[in-house]
Structure formats: structure tokens, C-alpha cells
Image (cartoon, rainbow, N blue to C red):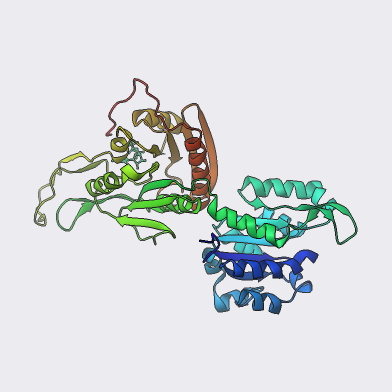
Amino acid sequence: MNSLANKRILLGVTGGIAAYKSAELTRLLRRAGAEVRVVMTAAAADFITPLTLQALSGQPVYSRWDEAGAAMGHIELARWADRVLVAPATADTLARLAQGRADDLLSALCLATTAPLYLAPAMNQAMWRHAATRDNVETLRSRGVRLLGPAEGEQACGDTGPGRMLEPEALLAALSASFESGALAGLKVLVTAGPTREAIDPVRFMGNRSSGKMGYAVAAAAAEAGARVQLVSGPVALPCPPRVERVMVESAAEMLDAVLERVADTDIFVAAAAVADYRPQAAAADKIKKTVQPLTLRLEPAPDILATVSRLPQRPFCVGFAAETADLERHARKKRLAKSLDLVAANRVGRGLGFEADDNELHLFWEGGDARLARAPKPRLARLLIEHIAARYRAGLAHPPQGDDHADHTA
Ligand code: CTP
């Protein structure tokens, strides 16, 4: 099946002479089965009419806030997209995006979307080579924005050099490849996410504040990177990410069962769930009645799902999270060894990060290396994490350190 079939492409068109090629690009995308929504800047309309792009995309073209509001809110449009491609992206557009501006619809969409952003620069060769543009490109790249082109050659202004927009066929091929040759293409990934609930009696449970957002973002990013993804989720109010197979569970015991049922057919296991460390020794059969006496609950350790999986003789590549309030690096390294993990993603909790927050930052540790992923929205961070996981997995580091610190870790 065509990798662009049913994919949602938000095409941004900005004011450059290459804007006429956006018409052909829209046609090619539609022919490949993609849904296309076009957003134009005011300057783009000087080069190509909205009517042309509307006819070719079969959808209304957005250029002003009120239009986006009428058909689909701008945040909704930003969420709708699987990929955002700005073609052509002028020097001014690169500058605006590097600055994170949001004073026109297209810039705001680029800021609001969590979908991968692709830019096809098109400008005069001197503008492309200018230090300001070089800086903007560098900034954008460091944030994970992908640049397609520019090509070298003769330019509309008579100059020759780098700055021509890539041809529509090349842009189509790049977008198509972004769906099929993901870093995890052909691999099977199993993810746990969300909290668990441990029953106290038929109406009460012990739980925690995990929102499940990070785990869901990891599952979505893994699917986006081409993996077949199964998600074992505790109770959360999040929709299942596209192309992810989800099973909902409640308790740590149910989560363990669901994971063990699936793990034999798994290449990479990512434990992002906030599994209860302790659970009531026995849930009361009937609702516990209130008395004036203090109530003592006896707790026992809940099964450690990640440690159980990492001890399996035929284990997948194991990734764990470590939520720490202090001494992050020491605890994270210790946790990696204690649970024999291939990679641990440590994050600080509290101070607006971690549980319930939309942003997070991670410090990754593996045998012989580490990497910091700066504070970012969880979907973006999840994509970077998946890239690291893929790189470690491919590097053949699927084998745990066989040190003396192989202790069972249940704390
Ligand atoms: N984990 C698990 N099963 C448990 C507990 C944890 O699979 N019963 C996984 C989590 O999904 C996470 C990692 O193990 O990937 C976290 O390890 P844990 O030892 O629980 O660390 P913290 O949650 O950070 O708590 P603590 O520091 O108290 O050990």
C-alpha cells in the first residue's frame, strides 16, 4: 500500500516564486492518496491564487484566522496533520519559525502542531548563504525540523547557486519516505503507559497522578517511526494514537499479564507506566465501613513488570523510565543496572515537569553513554527518545550489562 494513502498533509505555502510548484505538489499528494489542507500566507496569494489550490486539494484553503475558525479551529488543524510541509519556505518564513512567531495562521500552526515539520526552502542564493539564514536553519534543525533541499541551480533572479525549491516529485518522495522508512520500520514495540489502580475494596483503589501522556506519546512516535505498536494502558482519558493497538487494564497484576501475553512477539519494550510499587495485600470483598478507629491497610509489593520482562531468557530491548525528585543521575544509573535495562530515561518530577504536565525533559543513560533531551512538549520529546532507542537498538546493544548488580528491584 502507498505510504501516503490516507495520510493528512498540511501544506503551507509562503510568498516565493516557487509557489506555483505547490499546485503540482498538491496534485501529486492527492494522487498518492493523501488528504491535503493548504494554508497560505498573505504573500503567497501574490504568486498563486487560493482558488487553484482549493480546486486541487478539494478543500477550502486557509489563510486568515477567521477562515480557520469557520471550518476547523487552528489548533484542531494543527492536531489534524500527520505531517506539516511548508513549500516553498521563504527566508522570512525560516526566520519567523526560528523565532517561534504566531502572528499569522501558518506560523501559529507550525508552533501548535506536534506533527513533524518539513520545510522546503526557496530563496535567492545569497539569502540562503547569509549568516542570519544559516543561524535560523541551525536553530530549526536543532529543534528537530527537517529541511528538504534547497537544490542548486539557475534561479528566477538570474543567479546560480543553492536556493531552488526541490521539485514536487522530490518533495513527494521525501514525505512518502518519512512514513515508510522510519527508524523502527519492521520492528514490534510494546509500551506500557498510565497509572495502575490497586483495589482496596469494591469501590476504592490506590492510584497515582500519572496522566499517561508520555507513554502515549512514545507509542505514537514508535508507530510514526514505522513500528507495529501494542500499548498496554492503565486507566487514562486519552484517545488511542493512530495505528496503535491498545489494551486497557486496571491493576499491576493485569498489566503484567497483558505484557507477558505479548512480550514474546516484541523487539523493544518501553515501560512508561507508573505502576504501583505497593498494593493492598487483599482487597476487601465488601465496602469497608467507616468507624472512629484508625484504619491500617497492609500493603505488599506489586509485581515489577519491567524487572520481570528484563529477566526473561528471550528478552526484548528494555527501556525504563526513572522519575526522580533529587540526585537524578545517580538514581537513574543505579536503576538501569538494578533492572538490567538497555536504556533508562530519567526525568525530574515536580516543578511543573513530569506527572500531569504537557512538557518534560529527559536524561538518557545506556551502557557507556548518556544524552540530554531538553525540555519540550511530550510528543516532540517522545520522537527524540524513539530516535535514540532505534539507534541503541540498531547499534546492537540489546544485551544487558552482565554485572554483579543484578539484584531484584522491588522498591
Ligand atoms: N515499573 C514497572 N513495574 C513496577 C514498577 C515500575 O514496570 N511495578 C517500571 C516503570 O514503568 C518505569 C520503571 O520501572 O519504567 C521505574 O522504576 P521504579 O523502580 O518504579 O522507579 P520509580 O517509579 O522512579 O520509583 P522509585 O524511585 O521509588 O524506585
Q: Position of residue 41 (x, y in %)?
A: 71, 69
Q: Residue 409 is drawn in which quadrant?
A: top left
Q: Residue 157 is drawn in which quadrant?
A: bottom right
Residue 358, visible in the rendered structure: no
> Foreground: 407 or 166?
166
> Foreground: 263 or 365?
263
Residue at the spot 22% in from the left edge and 46% down from the top edge: 253
Q: Is residue 392 above or below residue 70?
A: above
Residue at the spot 37% in from the left edge and 56% down from the top edge: 245
> Foreground: 324 or 143?
143
126 left or right of 101 in image: right
Residue at the spot 67% in from the left edge and 56% down from the top edge: 119
Residue 121, visible in the rendered structure: yes
Q: Position of residue 368 (x, y in %)?
A: 49, 26
34 left or right of 201 in image: right
Q: Is residue 370 above or below residue 55?
A: above
Query: Whereabouts is ligand 1, in terms of quadrant?
Result: top left
Number of numbered discs present?
Answer: 0
Which quadrant does the C terminus fall into? top left
